[in-house]
Amino acid sequence: MQTIILAVALVSSIAWTNAAQGPLLLPAQESLAKIQRHGYVPFKRHIPSNLNLRGGGKGNVLITGGAGYIGTHCAVTLQEAGYTVMILDNFSNSCKKSIERVGEITGKSIEKVFDVDIRDKAALDKVFKENKVDAVIHCAGLKAVGESVREPIAYYENNFVGALNLIKAMSAAGCKKIVFSSSATVYGNPAKVPITEDFPLQCTNPYGRTKFFIEEMLRDVANADPEWKVINLRYFNPVGAHSSGKIGEDPSGIPNNLMPYVTKVAIGKLEKLTVFGDDYDTPDGTGVRDYIHVMDLAKGHVAAVDKLFSIEGEVVYNLGTGHGYSVLDMVKAMKEASGREVPYVIGPRRSGDVPTCYADAAKAKQELHWEAKLGVKEMCQDAWNWQCKNPNGYREEAELAGAKK
Ligand SMILES: NC(=O)c1ccc[n+]([C@@H]2O[C@H](COP(=O)([O-])OP(=O)(O)OC[C@H]3O[C@@H](n4cnc5c(N)ncnc54)[C@H](O)[C@@H]3O)[C@@H](O)[C@H]2O)c1
């Protein structure tokens, strides 16, 4: 009996500990059933003879920017997948309450939270020196395109120098596995759709270039040192929230992205939406994008972390649904989910916007055994649920009067 229990424990821990062995391919039907159930298929490997279990769990994953929108959802899915999560954030665009909410969802609070800025190399070194980190998901960064045009130096310093500091600290500590939050913005104005990972990269703004340069830096690092395992994830348009309504997107001020804006119009906090152009060559004339539910995106991160142990060097994956929806499709879906009107006006086109942008998500499906499961309906329902339960985001009414999040 004891032998059987030990064997079960070993198999459940194996995804983390046996990097040297290749994955045992599952029969196609079993894979499909698992994708349908979980959104991804965890890798199974042979049991190695020299197991080096790390505290019985699957391993310690540090999420930089882990208090933010995507980081919190990744924290939930990673905890649920058996990883021990640590969070590092400077809380410039988030607050500690979001981390408490992760614990409320999973029933397991995050014990190690580092209030650290990635521009502070010494503080980063200390974190890696004092803690056993097996892999990093690097989400910390500034992300507003318009702001990056006005303040490029701040973006290069925060995003690029911060990433360089992180890589140096990881390297010094011998932690050489990283999943990076890149963006479909690195494709610039694609010549056609759907976009595959081998499309030429051409960024149109400083924010996009920070993503591109970080990707390039990670590719160079992985080329130079085979111990490095790098996965660059190019997100399309993450929207929605956890179905509990406990965590979600909490932009400060006027939202830069479409869906938080639409949600705030639906709840009456903003008067109306301006649609930038209705004369594009698309079915209804408005821009078409690939919206992906943030929980699907988060599951893509679990699949990527699992995959870090069987790749060579650097690999890129698109995380999108492979389907495009227009601005007016999204407005209609939010109207249906909320039962509220979403008033809008048509404005001029915005410079730099492309008519249509959506992913070819086949590579992630084939190699990560992951695909997006949730549709536009769930994206809007969950975003609306989060908005209704948290009309002021993570802030209490009393905190609002001009206070920082
Ligand atoms: N949300 C999107 O639409 C989208 C799309 C593509 C890529 N991304 C990328 O994904 C990542 C996460 O995005 P998000 O939507 O969760 O944003 P977010 O602002 O909610 O989260 C980013 C987190 O990083 C933290 N941070 C910023 N600078 C930091 C620094 N110097 N040191 C430590 N922490 C710092 C912020 O406080 C915040 O908690 C970003 O890198 C973003 O560029 C986001």
Image (tube, rainbow, N blue to C red):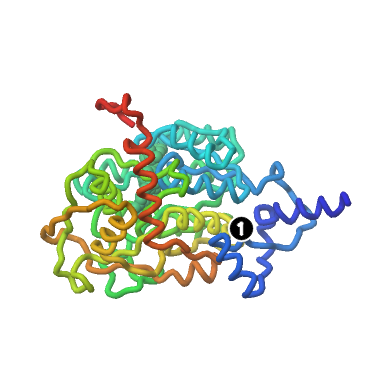
In this view, the residue farthest toward the right is 1
User: Does residue 162 appear anywhere in the picture?
Assistant: no
Secondary structure under badge 1?
A: loop
Q: Is residue 403 above or below residue 125?
A: above
User: Does residue 320 appear anywhere in the picture?
Assistant: yes
In the image, 97 versus 71, the foreground residue is: 97
State whether label 1 is within 8 Å of ligand 1. no
Q: Is residue 131 above or below residue 19?
A: above
Residue at x 51% of width, y 51% of height: 178
Quarter of the image where ligand 1 sits: top left
Residue at x 36% of width, y 69% of height: 323
- Residue 136: % across, % down: 52, 47
In this view, the residue farthest toward the front is 339
- Residue 341: % across, % down: 23, 53
Q: Is residue 337 above or below residue 59?
A: below
- Residue 362: % across, % down: 46, 72
Residue type at the position of mark 1: Phe
In the image, 105 versus 203, the foreground residue is: 105
Residue at x 57% of width, y 33% of height: 111
In the image, 115 versus 260, the foreground residue is: 260
Left or right: 55 as drawn, with respect to 107: right
Residue at x 45% of width, y 31% of height: 115
- Residue 278: % across, % down: 15, 66
Q: Quadrant of the C terminus?
A: top left
Left or right: 288 as drawn, with respect to 235: left
Disc 1 designates what residue? Answer: 309
